[in-house]
Amino acid sequence: RKYADKLGLQVLDQNGKQVTVTMGSYGIGVSRAVAAVAEVFNDELGLKWPRAVAPADVHLVVTGKNDDAITQAAESLARDLEGRGLEVLIDDRNGVSPGVKFKDAELIGIPTVVVVGKSLSEGNVEVRDRHAGTNTAVPVGSAVDAVVALCGS
């Protein structure tokens, strides 16, 4: 009756006497919704968020130890993607192996993962689609358009 008392909610009972109403509140909170999504949208690697509720549109994984070209390309790509209206999570942690970054990306489950790393020397980035299970080498110059198309923006 906490809220009914505070709001002064009263009705007449069957004898015409005013009584405070008994309220019920039933809802699905955010934590329950997240748990339900996680239970349904996952695989052996981790979460596979539906695009509509994913914490970000793109997970940008930067690999390569102290490589300025890779870092600059990743930062430029992130800015360009954000400029096209996508939310980007960047994993540019130093001292963390590519394998750990890839595993973390799978566990987090953002549907589109873009890897900026060793394939940059060939002019490519890797675009991974967690839902389709595909990994595609995409030329850096067309990466933004490819990712935007994949994300449906």
Image (cartoon, rainbow, N blue to C red):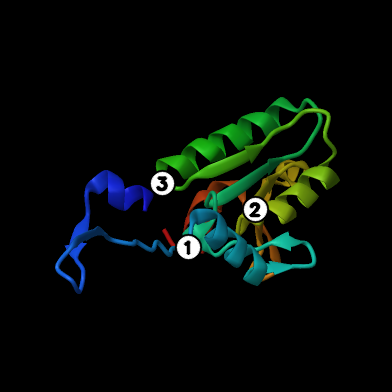
Q: Residue at x 51, y 61 (%)?
A: 51
Q: Residue at x 71, y 50 (%)?
A: 105
Tell me which label, 2 or 1, sits earlier in the chain.
Answer: 1
Gap in angstroms between the C-alphas marked 3 and 1: 33 Å
Q: Residue 135 lies in what quarter of the image?
A: bottom right
Q: Identify the residue position indicated by label 2 in the image.
A: 113
Q: Identify the residue position indicated by label 1 in the image.
A: 28
Q: Residue at x 78, y 43 (%)?
A: 118
Q: Is residue 86 left or right of residue 77?
A: left
Q: Amino acid at mark 2?
A: Val
Pointers 3 and 1 in contact (C-beta within 8 Å)? no
Instruction: Please determine whether, in this image, residue 70 is positioned above or below residue 109.
Output: above
Gap in angstroms between the C-alphas marked 2 and 3: 16 Å
Gap in angstroms between the C-alphas marked 2 and 1: 30 Å
Instruction: Please determine whether, in this image, residue 14 is positioned above or below residue 52.
Output: below
Q: Dot 3: what SS?
A: loop
* Residue in the foreground of this view, choosing between 98 and 31: 31
Tell me which label, 3 or 1, sits earlier in the chain.
Answer: 1
Quadrant location of the C terminus? bottom left
Q: Dot 1: what SS?
A: loop
Mark 3 or mark 1, which is nearer to you? 1
Q: Identify the residue position indicated by label 3 in the image.
A: 84
Q: Is residue 116 left or right of residue 14?
A: right
Residue 36 in percent (x, y) is at 59, 66
Instruction: Please determine whether, in this image, residue 64 is positioned above or below residue 66.
Output: below
Mark 2 or mark 1, which is nearer to you? 1
Q: Amino acid at mark 3?
A: Arg
Q: Residue at x 62, y 38 (%)?
A: 90
Q: Amino acid at mark 1?
A: Ile
Q: Residue 75 lies in what quarter of the image?
A: top right
Q: Dot 2: what SS?
A: strand
Residue 147 in percent (x, y) is at 53, 55
